[in-house]
Amino acid sequence: MISGMYTGPYTFNVLFLVIAGGCLYEFFGMTLDRHTRRDRVRKAFGVAVGLLPFFLVSSLSLGYVSDPATFIQLSSLLFAPFIFTVFIYELYSNSQEPFVNIAYIILGLFYIGIPFALVDFIAFDGRTFYYRIVFGLLLLTWVNDTGAYLAGSKFGRTPLFPRISPNKTWEGTIGGALTCVLFGYFLHLVFDEINLIQWLVLAIIVAVFGGLGDLVESMLKRSVGVKDSGNLLPGHGGLLDRFDAFIFVIPFAAAYILYLR
């Protein structure tokens, strides 16, 4: 993660392209059938649709498309036709639940594809590359998760959301939030792209929406009857299990940062 972000804009984009593609692959592995060649084609289609926003935004961030008007035209030309091709595929796929498949593909686009595309809006402001803000958000997410786990293990008594995640507690959530805000203070001493107040606001955003993102992914896994999104990372499950909180943080953090700019 560190080498991918610190070695330049191209490796930064490749890093998040791989993470986004892996998360989409796991998501469709949980939600779409995988028994026939048509199912595998559908899964590949879903990953391609989900990555389309990332490719479009990366072309703008890396300077391949320099004019915002051209970017809007290119997005319009590619985005809508590509989405509606999914409907045509399902028309001929002979699936028992074609609109369920369409719904999951579009859900993957909004749940995973668009948030990862927004990472570039955080990291790039014109020709300026603010990769350390993204790195700081990742660190805050991990610190929030770790603080919640440690506080919940030591002091946890009151269930937070037993219907979705029986092991999470209010004590753990509060402990994670306090740890996250404290770490936000230390971040501003190292990463000076934004000031102390702004780092603290981002820490609060992470503390609130990171926890919600974890619960949303737990809700997804319960609804499709799986324990982990994958087995890529021993002890952690898959990429989606590791980045579920970060994915949910990005839209709110991006909105705040773009408001500041």
Image (tube, rainbow, N blue to C red):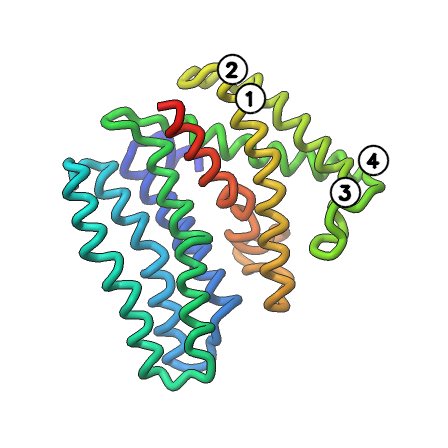
How far apart, in angstroms, are the residues tagged by discs 1 and 3? 23 Å
> Residues under labels 2 and 4: Cα distance?
30 Å
Question: Which secondary structure lies at badge 1?
Answer: helix
Task: Kindly indicate whether the residue at mark 4 contacts the one at mark 3 (C-beta within 8 angstroms).
Answer: yes
Q: Name the image quarter holding the N terminus.
A: top left
Q: What residue type is labelled 3?
A: Thr
Q: Along the horizontal axis of the image, is 249 left or right of 121?
A: right
Residue where numbered disc 4 is placed: 155
Q: Nearer the viewer, mark 2 or mark 4?
A: 2
Q: Residue drawn at (48%, 16%), measured in percent from left and top?
A: 190
Query: Callout 1 environment at 10 Å: few (<14), some (14 to 19), or many (20+)?
Result: many
Q: Residue 37: x, y in percent?
A: 37, 80
Q: Is residue 5 left or right of residue 60?
A: right
Quarter occupied by residue 200: top right
Q: Which of marks 2 and 3 is nearer the N terminus?
A: 3
Label 2 SS: helix
Is the residue under label 4 in contact with that under label 1 (CB below 8 Å)? no
From the viewer's perspective, is 4 left or right of 202?
left
Mark earlier in primary sequence (3, 4): 4
Q: Name the residue under label 1.
A: 200
Q: Which mark is residue 169?
A: 3
| Crowd band around label 2 with a 10 angstrom C-alpha radius: few (<14), some (14–19), many (20+) | some
Q: In which quarter of the image is the C terminus?
A: top left
Residue at 19 percent of width and 38 percent of height: 68
Q: Residue 39 carries which label?
A: none
Type of amino acid at the residue the image marks with label 4: Phe
Q: How many labels does the image show?
A: 4
Q: Distance between the residues labelled 2 and 3?
A: 29 Å
Q: Position of residue 62 (x, y in %)?
A: 22, 37
Quadrant in which residue 173 is drawn: top right
